[in-house]
Amino acid sequence: MIAEVVPKVFKQTAEKYGDRVSLRKKEYGLWHDISWNEYYRLAKCVGSALISMGLKKGECVSIIGDNCPEWVIIDLGIQGAGGVAVGVYSTNAWPQVEYVIEQSESRFFFVENEEQLDKWLHFRDKVPQLKKVIVWDLEGLKHFEDPMVMTYDELLETGREIVEKTPGLFEKRMAEVTPEDLSVLIYTSGTTGPPKGAMLTHRNVTWMARAIVADDPVYDTESVMSFLPLCHVFERLFSVFVHVTHGYTVNFIESLDTVMDNMREISPTMGYAVPRIWEKYLSAVYIKMSDATWFKKLLFGVALKIGKNRATLKMNFKSVPFYLEPLYQLAHLMVFRKLKERLGFDRMRIAYSGAAPIAPDVLHFFQSIGVNLIEGYGQTEGSGVTTVSRVGMVKFGMVGPPLPGVEVKIAEDGEILVKSPGVFKGYFRSPEATAETIKDGWLHSGDVGELDEDGYLRITDRKKDIIVTAGGKNITPQYIENKLKASLFINDAVVIGDKRKFLSCLIMIDEDNVVKYAQDNKIQFSTYKDLTQSHEIINLIQAEMNQVNDTLSRVEQVKKFTILPKKLYEEDGEVTPTMKVKRKYVNEAFGDLIEAMYRRKRG
């Protein structure tokens, strides 16, 4: 019988794979393995302890910390105890943490370390419903004592004692959990307004874990690398839901600074990341090639041209001529094979990009070198995935056809509407927002798009972001921004022009590539701000802007731009944890720069 409750799926998988490796973590230079048996045993201890401490079925428990085995063990322990697991972004400032703890009415709070515990200390008196705070990394907390705080090891010991004294307690609670009960509460990292808690049921996430692999299979021999925030639906899918359903190995990175090193070391068979990560890899390749010998540059250029010609045909669903395939195999043998080894992509048979639109040129590059990078589309409210391309059937500018069991239709105003078993239950304690989002069983995505003759979906923009110029022209800024982000020198772009006579743009430069350009061209600068204000760098970006404008209609062309004089940080509320620019915030924070572009004479 197919289980539709996450902890039951987990138990079945643990029994099936036993002592096979489930989780891996590197500490002090050595990889440590956790078997499926051990994974389940630890989660059972966590859940049993929580039940003994008063956690009732349906109550929320929050977790804050970086990706590690403890995070997912706690997650599944909570769910097995009938609780609702609530992830909190580890980069959130304490008022944002307080908001989630208070809004979710969390009864327990798991924190990684001293830094995260300090956040709770700021608001401890404002959340009286919290029973305990549990810390799993004690470095820096050797002498800290507080009646509200206990260690993770103490919790596990409590759980072990409960399992011995009351065998079957955990399984009894697990048996009470139904597919319609909440599995997780995922707070959207939205670009506007306070986050909302999306209620995903056990049926939602167990269905999604199977639907996502219906056409692109996942095997129990896979190895993946966990590094995106675990409280985001994208990472949670692969590190928890798909993982416990299909039984592969999850490897946890040492830190965000070691992602590329760990990628080479692990060489995962399945990859997934937000567009900014794929863009960084692309930039790294071109930076490396800029310092290569003329012969290596020539070889790479020829190989890439062959690869791009082949990828262009395949991405337009056209057959590859008989002479091109052997040329590509030669290019792969001479260039791409070694390149993929250096990136850590040599075993990667499939890779996903999601959570934000990826520039078609970035997708094209990876397809050209033989990395099966495919784009998916979805939102937290639909359990993460609505559409995804199939391996070997990737189209330019498209995010693929709907998953099996998902219905997609386009409303009269162009909005994408979704119906599937993955559509969420609603927003926690927000009936008004729920009613606005789900109407007649259809999820109103807030995105605008169109379906082609093959049933592939194209996303044109966010409904609320569409610009109507002073001349009454409708402009989709995302289309223009994606073209700009394809430049090696542009990290991000925000197009402005609502009720304006022309379009302007705020540009965020790609620091690595622009610094390299400045060094190669002996451009003097001492600070990041100096770099953004250099005439040579402004001219560089203008040249990139001109190239994009040449591909746009007259009303879509960006007439003026300003390079932002500072980097954007999640901690400052300027970007989301998945690196999407918060458009509303940026418009307000840099309003003076925007107004200056409209005051200056054009030309």
Image (cartoon, rainbow, N blue to C red):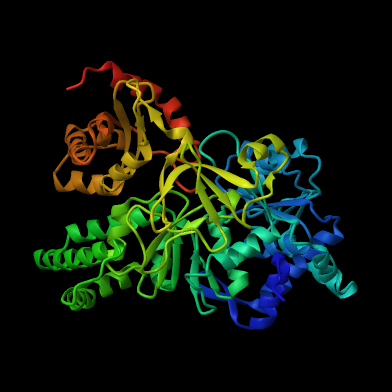
In depth, the one of 212 and 487 nearer the eye is 212
Task: State the residue lying farthest toward the left.
Answer: 294
Residue drawn at point x = 75 percent, y = 50 percent: 60
* Quadrant location, the C terminus: top left
Q: Is residue 394 left or right of residue 515?
A: right
In the rendered view, does 375 fall on the left or right side of 526? Answer: right
Q: Residue 330: percent from the left, percent from the top?
A: 19, 77
Which of 499 and 300 lies nearest the eye of the viewer?
499
Q: Position of residue 129 (x, y in %)?
A: 81, 43
Relative image position of residue 349 (x, y in whole percent): 40, 73
* Residue 5 to residue 589: above or below: below
Quadrant of residue 305 within the rendered picture:
bottom left
Asked if one can make out residue 227 in the rendered structure from this viewpoint, the answer is yes
Residue 453 lies, in percent from the top left, at 38, 55
504 and 217: which is toward the camera: 217
> In front: 29, or 48?
48
- From the viewer's perspective, is residue 223 above or below residue 104? below
Image quarter of residue 193:
top right
Q: Is residue 574 visible?
A: no
Task: In the rendered view, tell whether residue 340 sits above or below residue 453.
Answer: below
Relative to 242, 344 lies left or right: left
Q: Is residue 171 rendered to the left or right of residue 305?
A: right
Quarter of the figure that contains the N terminus: bottom right
How many marks on residues? 0
The residue lying at 63 percent from left, 58 percent from top is 421
